Amino acid sequence: MKALVRDAQSMLSAAANLTGEKADELRHRGMEMLDRALGKASYVQDQALERSKELAHTADVYVKDNPWRTMAVAAGVGILLGVLLSKNTK
C-alpha cells in the first residue's frame, strides 16, 4: 500500500510540471491510485477491528470459564515482573 501511495505521489508531482491533456491524465491516474489506497486502508482497518473484537470476545469467554486459572497466571506474571524490575533498579 505504501508503494501505491508513493507511485500516486510521484505521478501527481510529475503532473504538476506538465500541462494539457497529459497532465490531466496523470492527475486522474494518481487520484485513482490514491482512492484505491484509501479503499484498501479502510478494508484493512475494518478487518483489524473485526479480528480484535473476536479476540476480545474469546479472551472474555476464557476468563469467565477459567477465573482461577486466569488469576493464577496474572499473579505469576505480576510476581515475575516485580522480580525483574527490582533487579534492574539495584
Image: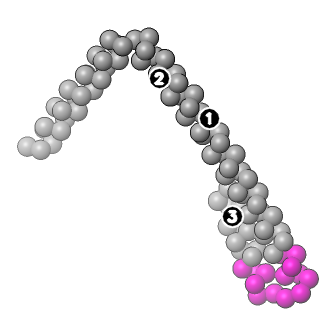
Amino acid type, callout 2: Ala
Which percent across, then down, holds residue 56?
A: 50, 28
* Above or below: residue 83 compared with residue 2: above
Tell me the residue that label 3 is attached to: 5
Amino acid type, callout 3: Val
The kind of secondary structure element at disc 2 is helix
Image quadrant occupied by the N terminus: bottom right
Please name the predominant secondary structure of the magenta segment in the image.
Answer: helix
* Above or below: residue 61 compared with residue 51: above
Question: How far is the residue under mark 3 from the one under mark 2?
Answer: 36 Å
- Give neighbour class at mark 2: few <14, some 14-19, many 20+ (Cα, 10 Å): few
Indicate which disc residue 59 carries.
2
x 62%, y 35%: residue: 50
Which percent across, then down, holds residue 16?
A: 75, 84
Question: How far is the residue under mark 1 from the one under mark 2?
Answer: 14 Å
Q: Which residues are magenta?
A: 13-26
Q: Quadrant of residue 7?
A: bottom right
The answer to whether residue 23 is magenta is yes
The answer to whether residue 45 is magenta is no
Image quadrant occupied by the C terminus: top left
